[in-house]
Amino acid sequence: MTEIVFRLANGTEHRVQAQEGDTVMSAALKNGVPGIIAECGGSCSCATCHCYLPGDKINAFPAMESFEEEMLEGVASERLPTSRLSCQLNITPDHAGIVIDIPATQL
Ligand code: FES
């Protein structure tokens, strides 16, 4: 188990225990964290799992592939340099304590 933190746009924090094999998206859904919709179920084709990494942890996950880059063009909330699609972020024990910000809207 790896504890990560989701922070909503209103500042509310949700601490969750991610299991081995979880993505940031699946950890949010399994734990009822609001704000991650994930309409496509993780196949990188909906962009409703948009999240923001901490500015000092932008390299904490492998660099995005071109298809993620393209999907990020269509996110509903502002795209920032720290934007990622949470379904593409596999959690490892190295991510313990990371704070993931969830945008105000996904649609
Ligand atoms: S869940 Fe659809 S792009 Fe991530």
Image: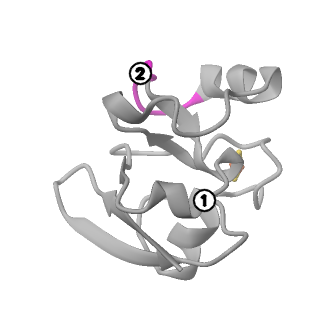
The vertical placement of 81 against 71, above or below, is above
Residue at left offset 40%, top offset 45%: 105
Q: Is mark 1 within 8 Å of ligand 1?
A: no
Residue 107 appears in view? no
Q: Amino acid at mark 2?
A: Leu
> Under tag 2, what secondary structure?
loop
Residue 59 placement (x, y as % from top left): 52, 30
Residue 99 placement (x, y as % from top left): 33, 52
- Asked which quadrant contains residue 20, the reply is bottom right
Left or right: 65, with 99 as reference point: right
Q: Return the mark for residue 7.
A: none
Name the foreground residue: 85 vs 1.
1
Q: Amino acid at mark 1?
A: Ile
Q: Which residue is mark 2?
A: 80
Classed neighbour count for the residue bearing mark 1: other residues with Cα under 10 Å, few (<14), some (14–19), many (≥20): many
The vertical placement of 61 against 43, above or below, is above
**Marks 2/1: CA distance?**
21 Å
Q: How is the image coloured?
A: one colour
Tell me the mark number nearer the camera, choosing from 2 and 1. 1
Residue at left offset 44%, top offset 27%: 82
For the image shown, how many numbered marks are present on the structure? 2
Residue at left offset 79%, top offset 41%: 45
Q: Is residue 52 magenta?
A: no
Classed neighbour count for the residue bearing mark 2: other residues with Cα under 10 Å, few (<14), some (14–19), many (≥20): few
Q: Is mark 2 within 8 Å of ligand 1?
A: no
Left or right: 74, with 33 as reference point: right
Q: Which residue is mark 1?
A: 91
> Under tag 1, what secondary structure?
loop
- Give whichever of discs 2 and 1 has the lower sequence position: 2
The boundaries of the magenta stretch are 75-81
Name the foreground residue: 13 vs 76.
13
